[in-house]
Image (cartoon, grey):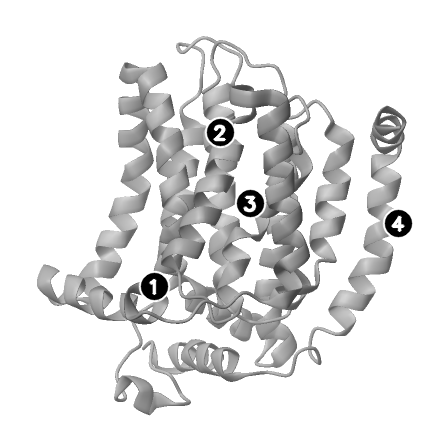
Amino acid sequence: MLSKLDHFLARNQKRLFIGFLLLYLPISLGTLVYSPLPWYDETYMASIALEFNQTGKFTPGVAYHAVDGQEDLVYGPLFFLIISTVYQLFGFGVFQYRMVAWLSGMLVLWLTMKLFQSKTEKKGRGFLVFALMAIDPFYLRCTHEGRNDLTTIAFLLGSLWLFLRFTQKEKSDEEKSWLPILFSGLLTGLAVLTTPRIGILFFGYGLLWLQFFFRNKKRSISAFALWLVPILIPYLAWYLYAFENWEHFISFYTQKMVGYTRLGEHPYYIPKQQYPLILAGFASMLIGMLRLKKDFFHPLIIFSIVSVILFYLLVYDNGPYAVFIVPSFYLLLFFAGEPTRKKTVYDI
């Protein structure tokens, strides 16, 4: 049964994509302005971008009392720079503002599919990853909310994809290009400059770097140094702009962490729309562990499991933050104990 489905998906993937997008895009874009209605986070962030466009400062034009009329430096500058550019090119409006999150969401779908296909021989199932995640009620709503979450996730998944390409390339170390790892670092730097909340996914990413280190110490050290350069240089520029000194930097984010993490002893909250995905994801993980045992734990599974567990342990989620782990759940769901792509001697 599954073999017939895989054969059908592999042969018709292009047609399926075209048919799906012809149905999906008009509905999703047609309702972008209306569903949901603009809310606090959107108007607040949109006003910062508008203020930056007019004054060059990251000061909110609405609810400015929330930061005592000062610049809001919690997130980083990149999202507001992007939105400000959109305003300059296409004008100010709900559709223009939300298009950044929507396009980021489409990129997250594509990257989740590409990550899945990088570790499986069932390439045709990539369409199902893309399509089912696209119509997930929670994820669909997130693509219509003008927050910076999907933008930073897109940057990090792009970084992860390039990192895996670098560590999986079927060539000798001498033949491998260093460009993927350099651009991987650049995308990670862009993710951090979009919002530091992406840090919750760094734990799983860090384990993949450790795995790479133990497999190839010499090359991994060089790669990590190269990876760090495009992260540290732009963030240092932001640090010099936003913070007076190191103590101010630490104090600033320590205070903000209370509202975002479980340090404040906040109650647990899980959106009801996510219940089926959570149950299916954990069921798939158990199936994979039983069927493949230790072979189940390839890099993407490690990244996904660590990200999901730490999210629920550390993050105070009052609704939208769970989008950070939606790609992880779909990766867990679609691997579902199926044999992955055969490793080469260069794989982590």
Asked whether 18 or 49 is in front, the reply is: 18
Q: Are marks 3 and 1 in contact (CB under 8 Å)?
A: no
Q: Residues within 10 Å of mark 4 (few under 14, many from 20)?
A: few
Q: CA distance from mark 3 to mark 1?
A: 20 Å
Q: CA distance from mark 4 to mark 2?
A: 32 Å
Residue 191 visible, this angle: no
Q: Amino acid at mark 2?
A: Pro
Q: Nearer the viewer, mark 4 or mark 1?
A: 1
Q: Earlier in the sequence, mark 2 or mark 3?
A: 2
Front residue of 298/73: it is 298
- Residue located 79% across and 61% down the image: 25
Residue 138 position (above or below residue 203):
below
Identify the amino acid type marked 3. Answer: Ser
Q: Name the residue tied to disc 2.
A: 299
Q: Report the residue marked by disc 4.
A: 19
Label ID, residue 261: 1
User: Disc 3 or 1, which lies upstream in sequence?
Assistant: 1
How far across and how far down the image is residue 104, in percent?
A: 58, 57
Position in image of residue 208 (x %, y %): 40, 30
Q: CA distance from mark 3 to mark 4?
A: 26 Å
